[in-house]
Image: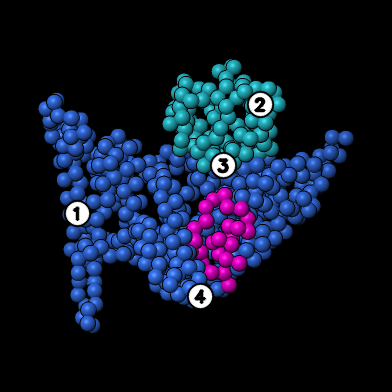
């Protein structure tokens, strides 16, 4: 599964990405997880199975959904899980989106 | 949550969405983001002059030969920092061209050429005590003094050009056998002429009526007073308040204020560097380096410290442990969303006060002349202490430590309140 995260500059999401990678490894899952700046979403469309937005850029959700279209599900990361860097919870959020979307 | 706060949250989210969608603000924001590395490099060229080539503050004190390198760094500094208006105007034209769906490179050059038509194309010179003029572009038009009028003309010219491009009758038709690139250039010919002449006529008319150049008029009547307001404590606190209000709702406040904030910060740094180059004392305290060291850092780090000092809440302490690493680099999201500070009315007052206190201390230290104004740009993500050292020297480090200590103190009473709230909740559950 290819999971892309986006926020402003991709800095704080990169902290979360590491935790998600750790969680995926623990569960024995070979996922590709990375973070980008919100400006770089358009050029990455088609490369990911699910896009998660940092809660601090949730006001971009409508625009991003239009950009991504039907190619992948888009959601805002649960704020508390994001803040507490709960990699497993965010990983599950991503998996649920792909499996149910 | 009450109805009022629901409406408030919705309203602020809508503002955030509108700011993001506004193509002019977006183009300005993108342009400054693209140009940022050059601002950093330009300011470092100035730093090299100070620490290497200066015979009073640099290595040249002992190795005089190094002074000969000065023109090299000065030229590189001039080409990036002191000429920033030209690339910014170009980039705004480029970004708008893309958004307007017209040939973007033509739109970029359109913006630049239009700006140059309203700039003075002569400079005043004094030779043998006689004043006269010579052909050339004045530094004020190239550098940060031209930023506002430059951004304005870039937007006007790009929009006018894009508007004219929508008329099919203005397109010079080419036979189908002509390559597309050439057709595109010829299609744009008449809109280019009309845009360029339109702006040029406007600039000329303004000069005839008012007796001065539009560049000078906008600088003295709009940009300069705004810069002064931005550099004042009231200006700083208002922009912090707006930024924090968005963060309180969990929206990236810095991202929202960026298009308004960044031109001021860039202009201030350029003014400081120019002052140093001219042998004067720089006088614009609030730059991006200031923002990184004294506005970004007190967001999360003091909360972590106050939590470790007095919080009895296990959940707070657990978050602080996760958040302190990123907090050292000015990344505050784990704290903002983890504690959370978002919609946390107990922590609202200290979250605003701590940032104002830290930045206010720094502004005060600059005003009384203890801390020198920033001339070296500091990138976001530079850790605590180092960010102050690079931008403001050892004095900056002292001020940052004092500012962060004050910010931590502000949180302590509220952390104790949070302890009591948790106790009360616990008691209610039992």
- Which residue is at the far bottom? B129
In the picture, measured across the screen, residue A86 lies left or right of residue B275, that is: right
Labels 4 and 1 in the same subunit? yes
CA neighbours of label 1 inside 10 A, class few (<14), some (14 to 19), many (20+): some
Return the residue nearer the eye: B136 or B369.
Answer: B136
- Provide the residue designation for mark 2: A24
Going from N to C along the chain, the mark reached first, 4 or 1, is 4
Of residue B110 and residue B40, the one placed in the foreground of this image is B40
Give the CA separation, mark 4 to mark 1.
53 Å
Q: CA distance from mark 3 to mark 2?
A: 20 Å
Which chain is depicted blue?
A: B
Q: Is residue B192 magenta?
A: no
In front: mark 4 or mark 1? 4
Contact, CB < 8 Å: mark 2 with mark 4?
A: no
The span shown in magenta is B370-394
Residue at mark 2 to residue at mark 4: CA–CA distance = 58 Å
What residue does disc 3 label?
A: A11
Label 1 element class: helix
Residue B210 is at least partly visible in this image: no
Which chain does the cyan colour mark?
A
Would you call the spot at circle 4 few (<14 residues within 10 Å), some (14-19), or many (20 or more)? few
Q: CA distance from mark 4 to mark 3?
A: 43 Å
**How far is mark 2 from mark 1, CA to CA?**
61 Å
Q: Which residue is mark 1?
A: B200
Query: Residue B411's spot in the image, x, y percent?
Result: 71, 54
On what subunit does the disc labeled 3 rest?
A
Label 1 close to label 3 by CB (< 8 Å)? no
**CA separation, marks 1 and 3?**
44 Å
The answer to whether B285 is drawn above or below residue B86 in the figure is below
The one of B96 and B43 positioned closer to us in this rendering: B43
Q: Chain of mark 1?
A: B
Tell me whether the residue at label 3 lies in contact with that at label 2, contact meaning CB atoms closer than 8 angstroms: no
């Amino acid at each position: 599964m290819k999971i892309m995260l986006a926020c402003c500059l991709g800095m704080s999401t990169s902290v979360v990405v590491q935790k998600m990678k750790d969680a995926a490894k623990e569960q024995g899952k070979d996922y590709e997880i990375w973070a980008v700046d919100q400006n770089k979403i358009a050029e990455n469309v088609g490369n990911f199975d699910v896009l998660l937005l940092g809660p601090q850029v949730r006001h971009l959700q409508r625009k991003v959904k239009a950009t991504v279209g039907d190619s992948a599900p888009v959601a805002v990361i649960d704020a508390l899980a994001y803040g507490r860097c709960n990699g497993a919870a965010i990983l599950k959020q991503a998996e649920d989106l792909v499996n149910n979307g | 949550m009450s109805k009022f706060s629901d409406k408030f949250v919705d309203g602020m989210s809508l503002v955030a969405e509108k700011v993001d969608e506004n193509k002019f603000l977006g183009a300005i924001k993108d342009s400054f983001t693209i140009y940022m590395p050059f601002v950093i490099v330009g300011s470092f060229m100035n730093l090299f002059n100070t620490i290497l080539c200066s015979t009073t503050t640099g290595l040249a004190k002992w190795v005089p030969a190094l002074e000969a390198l000065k023109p090299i760094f000065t030229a590189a500094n001039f080409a990036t920092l002191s000429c920033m208006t030209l690339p910014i105007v170009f980039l705004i034209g480029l970004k708008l061209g893309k958004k307007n769906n017209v040939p973007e490179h033509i739109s970029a050059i359109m913006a630049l050429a239009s700006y140059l038509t309203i700039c003075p194309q002569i400079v005043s010179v004094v030779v043998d005590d006689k004043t006269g003029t010579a052909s050339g572009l004045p530094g004020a038009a190239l550098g940060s003094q031209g930023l506002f009028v430059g951004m304005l003309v870039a937007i006007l010219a790009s929009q006018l050009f894009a508007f004219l491009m929508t008329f099919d009758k203005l397109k010079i038709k080419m036979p189908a056998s002509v390559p597309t690139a050439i057709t595109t250039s010829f299609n744009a010919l008449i809109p280019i002429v009309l845009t360029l002449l339109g702006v040029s006529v406007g600039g000329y008319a303004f000069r005839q009526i008012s007796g001065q150049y539009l560049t000078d008029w906008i600088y003295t009547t709009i940009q300069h007073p705004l810069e002064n307001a931005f550099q004042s404590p009231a200006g700083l606190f208002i922009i912090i308040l707006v930024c924090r209000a968005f963060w309180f709702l969990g929206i990236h406040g810095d991202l929202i204020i960026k298009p308004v904030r960044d031109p001021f910060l860039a202009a201030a740094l350029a003014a400081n560097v120019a002052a140093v180059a001219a042998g004067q004392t720089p006088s614009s305290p609030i730059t991006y380096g200031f923002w990184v060291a004294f506005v970004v850092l007190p967001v999360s780090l003091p909360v972590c410290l106050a939590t470790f000092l007095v919080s009895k809440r296990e959940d707070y302490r657990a978050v602080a442990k996760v958040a302190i690493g990123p907090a050292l680099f000015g990344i505050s999201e784990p704290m903002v969303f983890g504690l959370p500070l978002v919609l946390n009315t107990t922590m609202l007052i200290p979250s605003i006060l701590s940032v104002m206190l830290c930045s206010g201390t720094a502004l005060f230290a600059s005003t009384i002349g203890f801390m020198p104004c920033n001339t070296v740009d500091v990138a976001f993500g530079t850790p605590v202490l180092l960010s102050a050292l690079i931008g403001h020297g050892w004095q900056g480090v002292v001020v940052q430590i004092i500012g962060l200590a004050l910010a931590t103190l502000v949180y302590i009473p509220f952390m104790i309140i949070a302890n009591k709230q948790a106790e009360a909740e616990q008691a209610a559950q039992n």
